[in-house]
Amino acid sequence: MQPAFRRVALVGKQTPEIAQSLRALRDFLRQRGCEVVLERETAAGVGEAGTLTAGFEEIGRDADLAIVVGGDGTMLAAARNLAHHKVPLAGINLGRLGFMTDIALRDMSQSVGAILEGRHTIEERALIEAEILRGGKQLLCTVALNEAVVTKGSQARLIEFKLTIDGQYVYRLRADGVIVATPTGSTAYALSAQGPILQPTVRAFALVPLNPHVLSARPVSVSDSSVIEIELVHAVDARAHFDGFALTDLHDGDRLVLKRSADSIRFVHPPGYSYFTMLREKLRWSNAVGNRNED
């Protein structure tokens, strides 16, 4: 039987446990008739000859599926690199919580086998497109799967910023910063800052102030068709970062413009995947009432 995904790329961090899992997965995929390619840095950690290697640009051009072995950080890095190529991504969790890497290691063969047989679902996840402007000139243009964050730097001093949505003034705030999160990112940094959890199908961004200097500032969800602009009014030491990767120092007058990207991430889920089951397990909901299963 021809596999649903013929050419499969493998991505993982360079640790002995992940290397062992990658070797086992590579052998399993070959047995199922797949052509396997290892992402170049991943291959250095696996340390085995005879396997095709490729950079993310080549993977994006040629692969039918990319499987990420590791945690959400590894998935974030892979997703950012493959965002413009629309390569579907599946994740095997060897990290901690694993909100994006939803296949447990113990279920790897069964779940990947089902995906190769065509028994899977594909879920689109929104990306934020971010642009930093200074004096009308573009300093940075990038994308984020989880969140864009404006925050104070190493000095423990509040920053002051003005926020507008679609050109309409919303507020001027003194705070440690603000998070603009996608539904995917609503279970990441934004969750620890008391932001709302957004189901991935909800077309919204969450705006979450970080330690605001007024009690009335609260998280709010806005349509992801909006254009969000954050202008630095006063900041002795401020910076912007995106998924924890791209980092830029900000000055007074700098503007961060955010909108939904035309690109998206496609996650592949095995049979039986449920977003709310995942939340219940990861966040340990229902533990206080004896962990009853209502299914």
Image: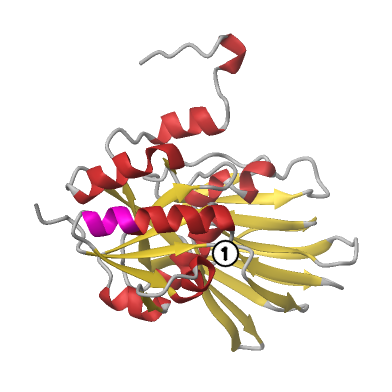
| Main secondary structure type of the part rendered in magenta | helix
Image-based side of 65 in relation to 177, left or right = left
Where residue 97 appears, as percent x and y from the top left, is 57, 41
Q: Nearer the viewer, residue 176 or 82?
A: 82
Question: Mark 1: which amino acid?
Answer: Gln
Q: Is residue 118 above or below residue 82?
A: above
Q: Which residue extends farthest front? A: 49
How many marks on residues? Answer: 1
Where residue 103 appears, as percent x and y from the top left, is 41, 42
Q: Is residue 252 visible?
A: yes
Asked where in the image residue 32 lies, by quadrant, the reply is: bottom left
Q: Secondary structure at mark 1?
A: loop
Q: Provide the residue span drawn in magenta.
A: 27-31
Where residue 279 appears, as percent x and y from the top left, is 49, 33
Q: Nearer the viewer, residue 262 or 54?
A: 54
User: 10 Å neighbourhood of mark 1: few (<14), some, or many (≥20)?
Assistant: some
Q: Which residue extends farthest left? A: 1
User: Where does label 1 land, which residue?
Assistant: 14
Image-based side of 286 in relation to 201, left or right = right
Quadrant housing the C terminus: top left
Residue at position x 90%, y 66% in the image: 155
Residue 139 belongs to the span the image colors magenta: no
Residue at position x 44%, y 48% in the image: 92
Image-based side of 152 in relation to 64, left or right = right
Q: Which residue extends farthest right? A: 156
Q: Is residue 89 visible?
A: no
